[in-house]
Protein backbone atom coordinates (compact mmCIF):
# COMPACT_ATOMS: atom_id res chain seq x y z
CA UNK A 1 0.00 0.00 0.00
CA UNK A 2 1.28 3.39 -1.03
CA UNK A 3 1.60 6.02 1.63
CA UNK A 4 -0.40 9.22 1.14
CA UNK A 5 1.50 11.81 -0.94
CA UNK A 6 4.01 9.25 -2.23
CA UNK A 7 3.92 8.40 -5.95
CA UNK A 8 3.63 4.70 -6.81
CA UNK A 9 6.88 3.03 -7.81
CA UNK A 10 7.51 3.68 -11.52
CA UNK A 11 5.02 6.57 -11.67
CA UNK A 12 6.18 9.99 -12.95
CA UNK A 13 6.81 12.48 -10.13
CA UNK A 14 4.21 15.19 -9.82
CA UNK A 15 6.75 17.97 -10.40
CA UNK A 16 7.84 16.40 -13.67
CA UNK A 17 4.19 16.15 -14.80
CA UNK A 18 3.66 19.84 -14.05
CA UNK A 19 6.78 20.83 -15.95
CA UNK A 20 5.78 18.68 -18.92
CA UNK A 21 2.29 20.19 -18.91
CA UNK A 22 3.67 23.74 -18.78
CA UNK A 23 6.14 22.97 -21.56
CA UNK A 24 3.33 21.59 -23.75
CA UNK A 25 1.27 24.71 -23.13
CA UNK A 26 4.24 26.94 -23.99
CA UNK A 27 4.79 25.07 -27.27
CA UNK A 28 1.11 25.36 -28.19
CA UNK A 29 1.14 29.07 -27.33
CA UNK A 30 4.25 29.62 -29.44
CA UNK A 31 2.72 27.76 -32.39
CA UNK A 32 -0.44 29.85 -32.10
CA UNK A 33 1.59 33.07 -31.94
CA UNK A 34 3.72 32.12 -34.96
CA UNK A 35 0.60 31.15 -36.89
CA UNK A 36 -1.07 34.47 -36.05
CA UNK A 37 2.01 36.52 -36.95
CA UNK A 38 2.49 34.58 -40.19
CA UNK A 39 -1.15 35.07 -41.15
CA UNK A 40 -0.90 38.78 -40.37
CA UNK A 41 2.35 39.04 -42.36
CA UNK A 42 0.85 37.27 -45.39
CA UNK A 43 -2.25 39.45 -45.19
CA UNK A 44 -0.17 42.63 -44.98
CA UNK A 45 1.97 41.54 -47.94
CA UNK A 46 -1.11 40.83 -50.05
CA UNK A 47 -2.66 44.16 -49.11
CA UNK A 48 0.51 46.09 -49.99
CA UNK A 49 1.48 44.08 -53.07
CA UNK A 50 2.42 45.99 -56.20
CA UNK A 51 5.16 48.35 -57.29
CA UNK A 52 5.21 52.13 -57.19
CA UNK A 53 4.60 53.91 -60.49
CA UNK A 54 7.73 54.72 -62.48
CA UNK A 55 8.34 58.41 -63.15
CA UNK A 56 7.92 59.60 -66.72
CA UNK A 57 10.95 60.48 -68.82
CA UNK A 58 13.50 58.11 -67.31
CA UNK A 59 16.78 57.95 -69.20
CA UNK A 60 17.67 54.35 -69.97
CA UNK A 61 20.48 52.78 -71.98
CA UNK A 62 20.99 49.14 -72.90
CA UNK A 63 24.40 47.53 -73.10
CA UNK A 64 26.10 44.29 -72.17
CA UNK A 65 22.79 42.69 -71.24
CA UNK A 66 21.88 45.47 -68.76
CA UNK A 67 19.17 48.12 -68.95
CA UNK A 68 20.59 50.96 -66.88
CA UNK A 69 18.81 54.09 -65.77
CA UNK A 70 20.97 57.19 -65.51
CA UNK A 71 20.98 60.93 -64.91
CA UNK A 72 23.25 63.33 -66.78
CA UNK A 73 24.53 66.87 -66.33
CA UNK A 74 26.94 69.12 -68.23
CA UNK A 75 27.64 69.48 -71.92
CA UNK A 76 29.43 67.31 -74.45
CA UNK A 77 32.01 70.06 -75.01
CA UNK A 78 32.99 70.36 -71.35
CA UNK A 79 36.77 70.63 -70.95
CA UNK A 80 36.96 68.49 -67.83
CA UNK A 81 37.05 64.72 -68.07
CA UNK A 82 33.75 62.82 -67.86
CA UNK A 83 32.73 61.66 -64.38
CA UNK A 84 30.54 58.66 -63.59
CA UNK A 85 28.92 58.50 -60.14
CA UNK A 86 28.07 55.11 -58.62
CA UNK A 87 25.71 54.92 -55.62
CA UNK A 88 26.08 52.80 -52.52
CA UNK A 89 23.69 50.29 -50.97
CA UNK A 90 20.04 51.37 -51.08
CA UNK A 91 21.01 54.55 -52.97
CA UNK A 92 20.21 55.57 -56.54
CA UNK A 93 21.32 58.09 -59.14
CA UNK A 94 19.02 60.57 -57.40
CA UNK A 95 21.39 60.55 -54.43
CA UNK A 96 23.71 62.70 -56.59
CA UNK A 97 21.03 65.20 -57.68
CA UNK A 98 22.61 67.99 -55.61
CA UNK A 99 26.20 67.27 -56.66
CA UNK A 100 25.52 66.66 -60.36
CA UNK A 101 24.68 70.23 -61.41
CA UNK A 102 27.73 71.62 -59.56
CA UNK A 103 30.09 69.11 -61.17
CA UNK A 104 28.33 69.67 -64.49
CA UNK A 105 29.64 73.23 -64.69
CA UNK A 106 33.01 71.84 -65.84
CA UNK A 107 32.43 68.14 -66.62
CA UNK A 108 30.06 65.78 -68.35
CA UNK A 109 28.57 63.92 -65.39
CA UNK A 110 26.56 60.71 -65.23
CA UNK A 111 24.97 58.90 -62.28
CA UNK A 112 23.48 55.43 -62.54
CA UNK A 113 21.08 53.13 -60.73
CA UNK A 114 22.71 49.81 -59.93
CA UNK A 115 20.66 46.71 -60.60
CA UNK A 116 18.25 45.85 -57.81
CA UNK A 117 17.95 49.39 -56.46
CA UNK A 118 16.04 51.98 -58.46
CA UNK A 119 14.83 51.91 -62.02
CA UNK A 120 17.50 49.83 -63.76
CA UNK A 121 16.29 46.38 -64.84
CA UNK A 122 16.87 43.72 -62.21
CA UNK A 123 19.84 41.48 -62.93
CA UNK A 124 21.08 39.31 -60.06
CA UNK A 125 23.37 38.43 -58.40
CA UNK A 126 23.93 41.71 -56.59
CA UNK A 127 27.60 41.27 -55.75
CA UNK A 128 30.40 43.71 -56.57
CA UNK A 129 31.63 41.72 -59.57
CA UNK A 130 28.24 41.58 -61.31
CA UNK A 131 27.45 45.21 -60.56
CA UNK A 132 30.91 46.14 -61.88
CA UNK A 133 29.97 44.38 -65.14
CA UNK A 134 26.90 46.63 -65.30
CA UNK A 135 29.05 49.71 -64.70
CA UNK A 136 31.47 48.68 -67.45
CA UNK A 137 28.57 48.02 -69.83
CA UNK A 138 27.23 51.53 -69.15
CA UNK A 139 30.62 53.17 -69.72
CA UNK A 140 31.01 51.39 -73.06
CA UNK A 141 27.44 52.08 -74.16
CA UNK A 142 28.01 55.80 -73.49
CA UNK A 143 31.29 55.65 -75.49
CA UNK A 144 33.32 56.75 -72.47
CA UNK A 145 36.39 54.83 -73.58
CA UNK A 146 39.95 55.44 -74.70
CA UNK A 147 40.92 59.10 -74.48
CA UNK A 148 37.39 59.76 -73.24
CA UNK A 149 37.67 57.36 -70.29
CA UNK A 150 35.99 58.81 -67.20
CA UNK A 151 36.83 59.35 -63.57
CA UNK A 152 34.57 56.85 -61.79
CA UNK A 153 33.40 57.67 -58.27
CA UNK A 154 31.94 55.00 -55.99
CA UNK A 155 30.07 56.11 -52.89
CA UNK A 156 30.06 53.91 -49.77
CA UNK A 157 29.65 50.28 -50.94
CA UNK A 158 29.80 51.62 -54.50
CA UNK A 159 33.55 51.92 -53.91
CA UNK A 160 33.77 48.12 -54.17
CA UNK A 161 31.87 48.19 -57.48
CA UNK A 162 34.30 50.79 -58.86
CA UNK A 163 37.32 48.86 -57.59
CA UNK A 164 36.09 45.62 -59.15
CA UNK A 165 35.41 47.42 -62.44
CA UNK A 166 39.06 48.40 -62.93
CA UNK A 167 40.23 44.96 -61.85
CA UNK A 168 38.04 43.55 -64.64
CA UNK A 169 39.06 46.20 -67.19
CA UNK A 170 42.12 48.29 -66.38
CA UNK A 171 41.42 50.67 -69.26
CA UNK A 172 37.87 51.44 -68.10
CA UNK A 173 38.73 54.57 -66.10
CA UNK A 174 41.18 57.43 -66.14
CA UNK A 175 40.93 57.45 -62.37
CA UNK A 176 38.79 56.07 -59.55
CA UNK A 177 37.59 57.62 -56.31
CA UNK A 178 36.48 55.85 -53.15
CA UNK A 179 33.95 58.28 -51.66
CA UNK A 180 32.89 57.71 -48.03
CA UNK A 181 33.73 54.01 -48.39
CA UNK A 182 36.60 51.54 -48.16
CA UNK A 183 35.24 48.67 -50.25
CA UNK A 184 35.39 46.15 -47.39
CA UNK A 185 32.55 43.93 -46.08
CA UNK A 186 30.52 44.94 -43.07
CA UNK A 187 32.25 44.02 -39.79
CA UNK A 188 29.56 41.48 -38.84
CA UNK A 189 28.43 38.39 -40.77
CA UNK A 190 25.07 38.81 -42.57
CA UNK A 191 23.36 35.89 -40.82
CA UNK A 192 20.03 37.65 -40.35
CA UNK A 193 19.03 36.85 -43.92
CA UNK A 194 19.08 33.14 -43.17
CA UNK A 195 16.86 33.67 -40.11
CA UNK A 196 14.50 36.40 -41.32
CA UNK A 197 12.75 34.46 -44.08
CA UNK A 198 9.63 35.32 -46.02
CA UNK A 199 6.93 36.38 -45.52
CA UNK A 200 8.48 38.28 -42.59
CA UNK A 201 11.34 39.79 -44.60
CA UNK A 202 8.95 41.32 -47.12
CA UNK A 203 6.74 42.64 -44.34
CA UNK A 204 9.66 44.25 -42.52
CA UNK A 205 11.03 45.89 -45.68
CA UNK A 206 7.63 47.29 -46.60
CA UNK A 207 6.99 48.55 -43.07
CA UNK A 208 10.31 50.41 -43.12
CA UNK A 209 9.58 51.95 -46.53
CA UNK A 210 6.07 52.95 -45.45
CA UNK A 211 7.39 55.00 -42.50
CA UNK A 212 8.21 58.54 -43.57
CA UNK A 213 9.43 59.23 -40.04
CA UNK A 214 11.94 56.37 -40.17
CA UNK A 215 13.21 57.39 -43.62
CA UNK A 216 13.75 60.93 -42.32
CA UNK A 217 15.60 59.66 -39.25
CA UNK A 218 17.94 57.43 -41.26
CA UNK A 219 18.61 60.22 -43.76
CA UNK A 220 19.34 62.81 -41.08
CA UNK A 221 21.68 60.50 -39.15
CA UNK A 222 23.69 59.81 -42.31
CA UNK A 223 23.63 63.33 -43.73
CA UNK A 224 24.20 65.33 -40.56
CA UNK A 225 23.13 68.72 -39.20
CA UNK A 226 24.18 70.59 -42.35
CA UNK A 227 21.42 68.88 -44.35
CA UNK A 228 17.89 70.19 -44.37
CA UNK A 229 15.22 67.76 -43.16
CA UNK A 230 13.56 65.82 -45.96
CA UNK A 231 10.33 67.27 -47.28
CA UNK A 232 7.43 65.03 -48.28
CA UNK A 233 8.70 65.13 -51.87
CA UNK A 234 12.21 64.30 -50.63
CA UNK A 235 10.92 61.25 -48.79
CA UNK A 236 9.28 60.07 -52.00
CA UNK A 237 12.54 60.56 -53.90
CA UNK A 238 14.18 58.05 -51.57
CA UNK A 239 11.17 55.73 -51.22
CA UNK A 240 9.83 55.31 -54.74
CA UNK A 241 13.00 53.83 -56.33
CA UNK A 242 13.01 51.22 -53.56
CA UNK A 243 9.45 50.18 -54.38
CA UNK A 244 10.40 48.95 -57.84
CA UNK A 245 10.66 45.31 -59.03
CA UNK A 246 13.77 43.56 -57.81
CA UNK A 247 14.42 45.55 -54.66
CA UNK A 248 13.12 42.86 -52.30
CA UNK A 249 15.34 40.35 -54.12
CA UNK A 250 18.31 42.61 -53.49
CA UNK A 251 17.37 42.98 -49.82
CA UNK A 252 17.24 39.19 -49.48
CA UNK A 253 20.60 38.81 -51.23
CA UNK A 254 22.36 41.43 -49.11
CA UNK A 255 20.87 40.08 -45.89
CA UNK A 256 22.46 36.71 -46.71
CA UNK A 257 25.67 37.77 -48.42
CA UNK A 258 26.32 41.31 -47.21
CA UNK A 259 26.62 44.55 -49.13
CA UNK A 260 28.79 44.60 -52.29
CA UNK A 261 32.40 44.41 -51.18
CA UNK A 262 35.94 43.36 -52.11
CA UNK A 263 38.27 41.06 -50.27
CA UNK A 264 41.49 42.47 -48.82
CA UNK A 265 43.59 40.68 -51.50
CA UNK A 266 41.40 42.21 -54.21
CA UNK A 267 41.80 45.66 -52.70
CA UNK A 268 45.56 45.22 -52.52
CA UNK A 269 45.55 44.08 -56.15
CA UNK A 270 44.38 47.59 -57.05
CA UNK A 271 47.87 48.84 -56.19
CA UNK A 272 49.18 47.15 -59.33
CA UNK A 273 46.50 48.68 -61.57
CA UNK A 274 47.92 51.67 -63.45
CA UNK A 275 44.94 53.90 -62.71
CA UNK A 276 45.05 57.03 -60.54
CA UNK A 277 43.19 56.54 -57.25
CA UNK A 278 41.82 58.86 -54.58
CA UNK A 279 39.95 58.57 -51.29
CA UNK A 280 37.57 61.37 -50.25
CA UNK A 281 35.54 61.21 -47.05
CA UNK A 282 33.37 63.24 -44.72
CA UNK A 283 35.33 64.58 -41.78
CA UNK A 284 32.60 63.48 -39.35
CA UNK A 285 31.61 60.24 -41.05
CA UNK A 286 30.93 57.62 -38.34
CA UNK A 287 31.43 54.84 -40.90
CA UNK A 288 34.85 55.91 -42.20
CA UNK A 289 37.25 57.57 -39.76
CA UNK A 290 40.34 59.49 -40.79
CA UNK A 291 42.51 56.51 -39.82
CA UNK A 292 40.28 54.22 -41.91
CA UNK A 293 40.63 56.58 -44.86
CA UNK A 294 44.42 56.61 -44.55
CA UNK A 295 44.53 52.82 -44.32
CA UNK A 296 42.29 52.52 -47.38
CA UNK A 297 44.46 54.90 -49.41
CA UNK A 298 47.59 52.94 -48.47
CA UNK A 299 45.92 49.61 -49.23
CA UNK A 300 44.80 50.52 -52.78
CA UNK A 301 47.76 52.75 -53.65
CA UNK A 302 45.87 56.03 -53.66
CA UNK A 303 46.93 59.59 -53.00
CA UNK A 304 46.66 60.79 -49.38
CA UNK A 305 42.95 60.99 -48.51
CA UNK A 306 41.04 64.25 -48.71
CA UNK A 307 38.65 65.22 -45.90
CA UNK A 308 35.68 67.48 -46.59
CA UNK A 309 32.87 68.68 -44.30
CA UNK A 310 30.02 66.27 -43.63
CA UNK A 311 29.15 62.80 -42.49
CA UNK A 312 28.34 59.88 -44.82
CA UNK A 313 26.32 61.69 -47.51
CA UNK A 314 28.90 64.30 -48.50
CA UNK A 315 27.40 64.61 -51.98
CA UNK A 316 24.35 66.14 -50.31
CA UNK A 317 25.83 67.98 -47.34
CA UNK A 318 28.92 69.38 -49.11
CA UNK A 319 28.38 69.39 -52.89
CA UNK A 320 30.65 72.35 -53.63
CA UNK A 321 33.54 71.08 -51.55
CA UNK A 322 33.16 67.60 -53.04
CA UNK A 323 32.94 68.96 -56.58
CA UNK A 324 36.11 70.97 -55.98
CA UNK A 325 37.95 67.89 -54.68
CA UNK A 326 36.82 65.76 -57.63
CA UNK A 327 37.73 68.46 -60.16
CA UNK A 328 41.17 68.85 -58.56
CA UNK A 329 41.73 65.09 -58.83
CA UNK A 330 40.61 65.12 -62.48
CA UNK A 331 43.00 67.97 -63.28
CA UNK A 332 45.83 66.20 -61.51
CA UNK A 333 45.48 63.20 -63.81
CA UNK A 334 45.10 65.35 -66.91
CA UNK A 335 41.36 65.75 -67.08
Image (spheres, helix red, strand yellow):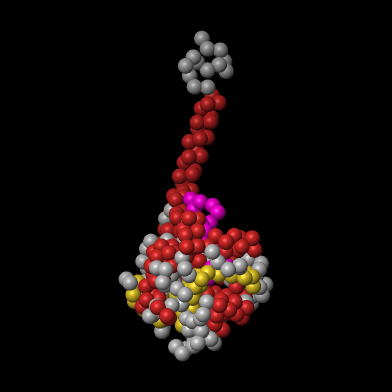
Foreground residue, 161 or 241?
161
Q: Is residue 218 above or below residue 326?
A: above
Foreground residue, 189 or 130?
130
State yes or no: residue 186 in magenta: yes
Position of residue 233 measured from the top left corner of the image (x, y, whole percent): 54, 79
Foreground residue, 123 or 174?
174
In terms of image quadrants, where is residue 293? bottom right
Q: Residue furthest left?
A: 65
Can residue 214 be seen by looking at this rendering?
no
Position of residue 317 measured from the top left corner of the image (x, y, whole percent): 62, 75
Q: Is residue 289 left or right of residue 12?
A: right
Q: Give the residues in magenta.
A: 177-192
Q: Residue at x 54, y 52 (%)?
A: 188
Q: Is residue 249 left or right of residue 181?
A: left
Q: Is residue 245 left or right of residue 208?
A: left
Q: Residue at x 51, y 27 (%)?
A: 17
Position of residue 9 measured from the top left corner of the image (x, y, whole percent): 49, 14
Can residue 95 be seen by looking at this rendering?
yes
Foreground residue, 236 or 304?
304
Position of residue 115 measured from the top left corner of the image (x, y, whole percent): 41, 68
Q: Residue at x 36, y 66 (%)?
A: 123
Q: Is residue 40 above or below residue 29?
A: below
Number of numbered markers: 0
State yes or no: residue 47 in magenta: no
Q: Main secondary structure of the magenta part?
A: loop
Amino acid sequence: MTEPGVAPRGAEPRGARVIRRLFRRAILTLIAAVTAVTAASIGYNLATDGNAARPAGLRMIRGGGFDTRYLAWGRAGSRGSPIVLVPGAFETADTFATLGPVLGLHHRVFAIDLSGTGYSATSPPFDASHLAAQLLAFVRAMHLTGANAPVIVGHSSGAAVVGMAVLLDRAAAAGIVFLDGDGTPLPFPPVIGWVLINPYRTTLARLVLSSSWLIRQIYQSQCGPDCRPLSAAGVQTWRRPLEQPGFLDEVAYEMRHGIPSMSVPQLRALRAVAVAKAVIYGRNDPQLSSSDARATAARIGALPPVAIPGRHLTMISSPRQLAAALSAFARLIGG
